[in-house]
């Protein structure tokens, strides 16, 4: 369900997201956000209740924006060859997971007792899986894919692999360049390359 945000709320959320992405949730104070947004500290409480509740609003705002951008993205690749479409779909999911990595701990915790967050994620996952299924069928019909795996299985592999790497820096940093300063950037490249090999192998990709 699409939630309506006021212009002021969107401004605050945009500012908060940039700060949290840079400093982390714990490292970002309400005062940091209000100073950067050029508003009174009390406005955070007025619009969101607390910093923690603001994070839930921010998550829903991000999901909404991501669904809108995905709709535009899907339209851009609509007429491409199935192998190109699948490659771009995998890249899209991986890039979103790494770009907004600071949400993952919050989502895991909040989804335990917030059904609306579960619904937001369910709708987005379903939309994405439907698009993947469309591309798989197109690839089978054109002969470039010889296997038709379930889209939910491919999606769970992509998301699961990406989240493992994001959450286990101590382990995975041993296998990527730029262990500290560029960890996420280098890890994303490695994960994407491996996932593309995995996904296309499962699909039985047969280049013409």
Image (spheres, rainbow, N blue to C red):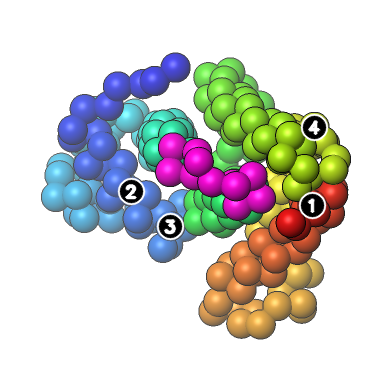
Between the C-alphas of marks 3 and 4, the distance is 33 Å
Between the C-alphas of marks 1 and 2, the distance is 43 Å
Residue ID for mark 3 = 21
In the image, residue 112 sits, relative to residue 22, either above or below, namely: above
Secondary-structure class at tag 4: loop
Stretch of the chain drawn in magenta: 75-85
Dot 4 crowding, Cα within 10 Å, few <14, some 14–19, many 20+ = few
Residue 72: x percent and y percent? 40, 38
Residue at point 15% right, 42% down?
40
Residue 150 circle label: 4
Residue ID for mark 1 = 205
Between the C-alphas of marks 2 and 3, the distance is 8 Å
Residue ID for mark 2 = 16
Cβ–Cβ below 8 Å for labels 2 and 4?
no
In the image, residue 58 sits, relative to residue 191, either above or below, namely: above
Query: 9 left or right of 147?
Result: left
Between the C-alphas of marks 1 and 4, the distance is 15 Å
Q: Which quarter shows the C terminus? A: bottom right
Between the C-alphas of marks 2 and 4, the distance is 37 Å
Residue at point 60% right, 52% down?
84
Query: Looking at this rendering, what residue extends furthest in the bottom direction?
Result: 177
In the image, residue 177 sits, relative to residue 205, either above or below, namely: below
Q: Is residue 137 magenta?
A: no
């Amino acid at each position: 369900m699409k939630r309506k945000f006021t212009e002021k709320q969107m401004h605050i959320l945009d500012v908060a997201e940039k700060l949290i992405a840079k400093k982390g949730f714990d490292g970002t104070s309400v005062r940091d956000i209000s100073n950067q947004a050029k508003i009174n500290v009390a406005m955070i409480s007025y619009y969101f209740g607390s910093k923690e509740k603001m994070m839930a609003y921010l998550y829903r705002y991000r999901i909404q924006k991501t669904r809108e951008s995905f709709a535009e993205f899907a339209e851009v690749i609509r007429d491409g060859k199935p192998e190109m479409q699948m490659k771009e779909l995998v890249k899209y999911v991986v890039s979103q997971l790494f770009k907004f990595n600071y949400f993952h701990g919050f989502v895991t915790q909040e989804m335990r007792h917030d059904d609306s967050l579960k619904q937001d994620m369910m709708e987005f996952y379903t939309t994405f899986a439907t698009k993947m299924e469309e591309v798989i069928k197109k690839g089978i019909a054109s002969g470039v894919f010889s296997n038709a795996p379930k889209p939910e299985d491919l999606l769970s592999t992509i998301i699961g692999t990406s989240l493992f790497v994001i959450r286990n820096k101590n382990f995975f940093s041993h296998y990527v360049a730029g262990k500290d300063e560029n960890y996420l950037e280098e890890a994303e490249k490695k994960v994407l390359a491996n996932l593309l090999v995995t996904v296309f192998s499962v699909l039985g990709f047969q280049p013409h």
